[in-house]
Image (cartoon, helix red, strand yellow):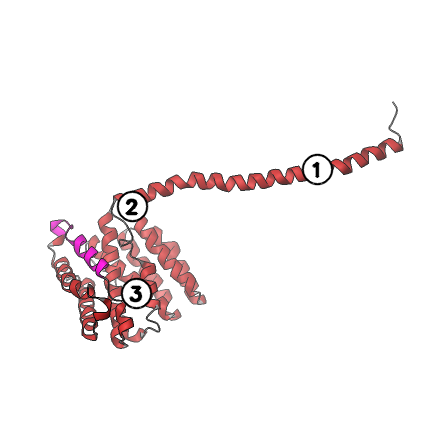
Amino acid sequence: MAFPSPASNQKWRDCLCKTEPKRVKIRTVSILVALTLVPAAISENQEEPTEDRQHEREELGVNAYTAPSIERIFAQLDQLRPLPFDQLKRELPQSIVAGREHKGLVFGGLIADGFLIVEAERKNLVENFGRVLMEQARALGVGDRVMRHSASLTELGRRGEWQQVRQELISTQTDVEQAMIELRDEKMAHLISLGGWLRGLEISAGAVEIEFSPPRAKLLAQPDLADYFGAELKTLPPTLAHLPLFEKIRASIKKLQPILGKSPEALTRADIGLIRMEASGLNEAIRRGE
């Protein structure tokens, strides 16, 4: 058997040197094409569930108001900084024996209390807030949804990473809302939002009243939200709508609607004081279950 001559071997090596870069180039292009196509395929596969989820939300009446607007409330509080925390804070809720709808209102108010803690950047209060949030979530039957967020809130708060804490609060409400959607319980989504809006309204009105100016007062012109929740309360089942607590909420929102519906430039210090008083009274009633 004859072996290739040294000259033949050299020619073979020269040939390999010329063709190998082409092979590498072809393989590299193939990998890049694959990496380009895979995310597109994943995105295409994920698009339908997202559309289905959005359709389900709209079908159940869950929209920009029924989740409200954690980011909207944050944006409003951002414009009122620095917040007089000691004058706006309140004790976090204790465990209560109440109907599920009442617990939904309490949970929404607790989320708003979390906004205040985050806006004021109170590290020493975040851990207790996370614990109470978890207790209230369990009472609503959504403890599994909130557990991860509660732990993350506590850790991020300890480190003072407030932007991330804000995001966790937003994610918390999103997950709770999604749990209600999956249970096809849109009324609970509305009530959680209502509780959050009422406490957020009290905080905002309090901050404006303490340091009043027409530009700050403009932030409280919220006719859309007042009208929305006023209309939504009319759709509650009679057994719920005629409970003293819900009758009180309905009457107070009706009283607030013409004030919140004023031209933003027309809101006076007296108007702001009335908004705060009504919202504060409702939030106290929710806490007491009256």
Residue 138: x, y in percent?
30, 54
Tags 1 and 3 touching, CB below 8 Å: no
- Position of residue 246 in the picture relative to residue 170 (left or right): left
The three-letter amino acid code for the residue at tag 3 is Asp
Q: How far apart are marks 2 and 1 (CA)?
A: 53 Å
The three-letter amino acid code for the residue at tag 2 is Arg
Q: Residue at x 88, y 24 (%)?
A: 2
Q: Say which residue label 3 marks.
A: 113
Say the numbered circle drawn on residue 57.
Answer: 2
Q: How crowded is mark 1: few (under 14 residues within 10 Å), some or many (20 or more)?
A: few
Q: Distance between the residues labelled 2 and 3?
A: 26 Å
Task: Point out the image quarter for the N terminus.
Answer: top right
Is residue 218 among the parts visible in the rendering?
yes
Magenta highlight on residue 168:
no
Tags 2 and 3 touching, CB below 8 Å: no
Q: Residue at x 30, y 65 (%)?
A: 113
Q: What element carries label 1?
A: helix
- Sooner in the amino-acid sequence: mark 2 or mark 1: 1
Q: Residue extending furthest top? A: 1
Q: Which of 266 and 134 is in front in this view?
A: 266
Q: Say which residue label 1 marks.
A: 22
The three-letter amino acid code for the residue at tag 1 is Lys
Q: In which quarter of the image is residue 259?
A: bottom left
Q: What element carries label 2?
A: helix
